[in-house]
Amino acid sequence: MQMVKKLLGYYLLIVGLFFTGRLLLFIVYFDRFSQSGENYWLSFMYGLKMDTMVASMLLIIPLIVLSFSPKAWAKVSNIFLRVYFVLVFGFIIYIENATFPFFTQYDVRPNFKFVEYLEYPVEVFNMIIADYKLALGIAFIMIGLFVWFFWRKTKESFLPVLQQPLLKRALLFFPLAILLFIGIRSSFGHRPANISDAMYSSNRILNEVTKNSLYSVGYAYYANKKYETKVIKQYGEMSIVEVLQRMQNVLAIKGNDLNATSVFSRMEKTHFPTEKKKNLVIFLQESLGYQFITPQITPELLKLKKEGLWFNEAYSNGTRSVRGIAGVTAGFLAVPGKGVLKRTKSQSDFFTFSSLLQPLGYHTMFLYGGEARFDNMRSWFLGNGFNEVIEQKDYTDPKFVATWGVSDEDLAAKGNTRFSALYKEGKPFAALMFSSSNHSPFDIPSGRVEALKKGEKCVENAIQYADYAIGKFFEEAKKMPYYKDTVFVVIADHNIRVYGDDVVPINMFHIPALIIAEGLETNTYDRLASQPDVLATAIDLLGKDLKYPILGKSIFSDEKHDVVLMQFNESYALRIKDRVAVIRPRQAAKTFKYVDEHLVPVAHDTQLEKDALAFVLGLNFLYSKQRFR
C-alpha cells in the first residue's frame, strides 16, 4: 500500500496548490460575483473536478514508473521521479502565479493566448520583462524555494516503493490506473467532463474562478487545433443551406447561389459615382477602445471627427489584432479558432481590398512599424495580393524605436512619403497602416505629449501619443496633393482589454471609427456598425460599382441592418439592435437584452439563437471550403 499512499499524497499536494490559487482568485474577485445571486461556493466543488482531472493526468507517468521499474533500476527511477515532480510542481507554481497578471490583463484565466505567441520570443520576452517584473520575481522565488526544499526532503522518497517486489507493484497498476482513468474522465455519462463543467454559472467571472489554468491552456490549445473538424460541432449543428441563408438574411446580403465559389460575392453599386480612381488609406489603431475617446486623451481624433463621418456605435469583431485586420482588409468576421491571418487555407485566394482593387490598376500595400512576420502578417498580405509590405527594416533613422518597432510618428511620416510618391507617379493606391505604440509595455518618445500620468508607462499616455501621431499624419497629408483624392479611415482593431462580468462584455467591443474624404458631408452615424461595415462604406466612397464578398454593408445602403457579431474567447454574441444571442460550445444558447451596457437575460429567442449558430458554422464553412473570394 506504500505506492497508494505515495500517489495519494502527491494527488493531494497537486490539488492543494490548485485550491490555493483558486481561493486567492476567489478572494480577489469576490466583488465581481458576490451579488450575482449564484451559489458561488459551488465553484470549489466544480473546481475540484477540474483539478482532479489534471492531477490524474499528471500521475500517469509516476504510476507507470512505480509499477514497472525493475528493482535494479530503483535509484535511477527515484531520481527520474524527483526530477519529474520538480518540473510538474515548478510549472504549476508558475502558471498559478501567472494566472493573476493574465486575469488582470484579459479578464480570464490563461487560455490559448498564453502559448500562442511563444513563436515570437523576443517581442514576448521584452514585453513580459517590462510589465511583469514583480510577478516574475515572486514566481521564481517560490519555485526556487520549492525546488530547494523538495530536493532536500525527497532524497530517497521513492526507494521504499521501488524496492518492493515487481509483481506486487505490477498488480496494483490496473486498479490504480482505473482510478486515474475515472479521475481524468470525471464523469460516468456518455461524454467525459471538460471545460464546460466549470461553466455552471451565468456569471462569467465565477466560471473563470472555477476553471483550472493548466487545463484551460491545454484544452484551448487542443481545441484550436481541432476547430475545423470536431470542436466546431460542439456549438451545434445545422444544414449548410440553412446556415448560409440565415447569414444572408441577417446581413441583408443577396449573394450568389449557395453552391457558388464565392457565396457572398455580389455587385454593389456606389452611391458616389466618379470617373476618378480615388485612393484608400486605412489607419488601423492598436487597442483603441471607445472609452478612451475623450478631450484629454484623444484631442486630435476629436478634431478630425468634425471633418468626416463618425461611427458612434462601431464594434470590433474580436479581441485580437488578427481579427481586426481581417475585418478592415477583407470584411471578414471572426472565424472560430485561429484567425484567418494564421490559417493555412487563407494564405492565398482569400478576398482582400487588394484583390478587389488591383485589377483596376491600384498599388496595394501594408505599412507597419514592427516586424511583419508577427502574427504571420507578411505572409498573409503578400500571399493575398498586396504589392508591398513596409516594416521596421525599411525605416531609415527612425525617430524612436520601441519594443514593438518604430513609433507611430515614424509610421505616419513613412506613409505620407510613400503615398505622395505614388500619387506623383500617377498610380492609385490602397493601403493599410497598422500602429503599434499603444501596446504593452507602452514605450513612447518623450517630449511629444504632456503625460497624463507622470513618469508612468500606461495605456492613457500611449493612446495620447498614438492620437498625436494621427494628428501629425493628417496635418502633413493635408499639405500634399494626394489628400484630395483619397478616402481615409481611422479605426481600432480592438480594445486594450476586454473585461466584464457579462458572459460577453459587449461594451468593451465598442471602438472608434472615422472616415474622411473630399466632399463627404460631416455627420455622425448612430446605428450599429461592424468593421466590415466600415470597410464597405469606405469602398462605396471610392465611387465605383464593385463586386465583392464583404460581410458588411455600406451605411449609405437602405438595406443595411443593425447587426454586429463579436467573438470573446470561445463565446459568440450576435447583436441585432438591442437583442443579443450568445452561444458557446457544449452550452445551451441564451438570449439577452442589452440595457445600460449590460446583458439582461430574457426568454429564449430561438430564431436569433439559430442565427448566431449560423454565423459560427458559416464562417468556418467559408474558410474551410475556401468560399470567401
Image (cartoon, helix red, strand yellow):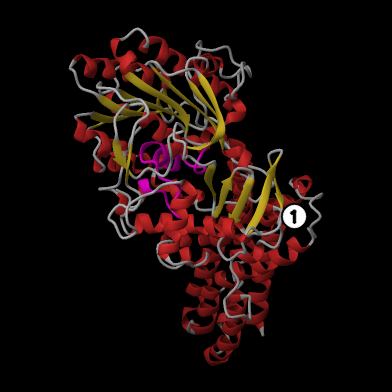
Determine whether 491 is above or below 54 in the image.
above
Q: Magenta segment range?
A: 315-341
Residue 340 place in picture, x, y as percent: 37, 48
Q: Is residue 329 left or right of residue 181?
A: left
Determine whether 458 is above or below 373 in the image.
above
Q: Is residue 418 left or right of residue 310?
A: left
How many marks the image carries: the answer is 1
Closer to the camera in the image, 337 or 533: 533
Q: What amino acid type should be assigned to the residue bearing mark 1? A: Leu
Q: Name the residue under label 1.
A: 23
Q: Check disc 1: other Cα within 10 Å, few if <14, some if 14-19, many if 20+.
A: some
Location of residue 332 by image quarter: top left
The N terminus, quarter of image:
bottom right
Closer to the camera in the image, 339 or 397: 339
Residue extending farthest front: 558
Q: In this view, does 567 lie to the left or right of 258?
A: right
Q: Does the magenta stretch include residue 421?
A: no
Residue 491 place in picture, x, y as percent: 47, 29
Q: Residue at position x 31%, y 28% from top?
A: 431
Residue extending farthest top: 479
Res. 12 visible in picture? yes
Location of residue 421 by image quarter: top left
Closer to the camera in the image, 321 or 513: 513
Res. 214 visible in picture? no
Q: Residue at position x 68%, y 48% from top?
A: 593
Determine whether 237 is above or below 414 in the image.
below
Q: Residue at position x 74%, y 62% from top?
A: 44
